[in-house]
Image (cartoon, rainbow, N blue to C red):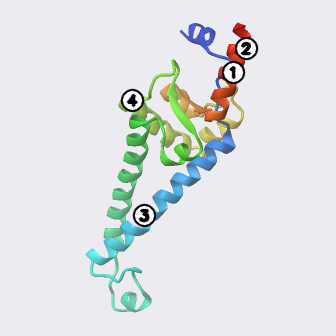
Amino acid sequence: MQNRLLMKESYTVDYAGFWLRLAAFLIDGLILWGFNVLLTGLWNLASGLPWSGISDQLVAEGITTVPLWWLRVAVFFVVLVMYFIAFWAWRGQTPGKMALRVRVVRFDGSPVGWGGAFLRICGYIISILPIALGFFWVAFDGRRQGLHDKVAETFVVRIPSRRERQAWGMSAQQGKA
């Protein structure tokens, strides 16, 4: 199957490299960090704490939030996982990837779908475990695939700009003439 897919690949496929993917991930990280700040503040208010959280005075009075902290971390982990799965399944792009014009696709160019998105997030978790080596693999792989891409059989490709698509259209028309 791999050989058949290789023959169908176009020379115009532009795999997104390590730095572009890292930049998209950092944008997503900023979005998730903002959500976490909001979640933490709301969590604190619901727990009867000030927005800024526990203070030295509250600790001196014997008030702690350790049990609630683990629950909040679990809630944030679920939100993080659903963020990636939902965006990959819906558009093949998270907001960070949208901003940088890259998309996650399957080997045949089709959308990732819910099953592929789930496999990909499982691959993310596996990629993080050995000091994030699964992510760094992107820099050395010929098709710019990380371990999570290989698990889910996906690629991250750059989406050409309108100017690039127009230039390709003009060169294709010149080739026919």
Q: CA distance from mark 2 to mark 1?
A: 6 Å
* Residue carrying label 2: 174
The numbered disc on residue 113 is 4
First along the sequence among labels 3 and 1: 3
Q: Is residue 42 left or right of residue 164?
A: left
Q: CA distance from mark 1 to mark 4?
A: 33 Å
For label 4, the crowd category at 10 Å Cα-Cα, with few meaning under 14, some 14 to 19 and many 20 or more, is some
Q: Is residue 159 left or right of residue 56?
A: right
The answer to whether the residue labelled 2 contacts the one labelled 1, judged by CB atoms less than 8 Å apart, is yes
Q: Quadrant of residue 55?
A: bottom left
Residue 174 position, x and y percent, is: 73, 14
Query: Depth-wise, is mark 3 or mark 1 nearer the camera?
Result: 1
Name the element at disc 1: helix
First along the sequence among labels 3 and 4: 3
Q: Is residue 149 left or right of residue 7?
A: left
Amino acid of disc 3? Asn
Name the element at disc 3: helix
Name the element at disc 4: helix
Q: With respect to residue 47, does 137 lie above or below?
A: above
Residue sitting at x 43%, y 44%? 84
Q: CA distance from mark 3 to mark 1?
A: 47 Å
The numbered disc on residue 5 is none
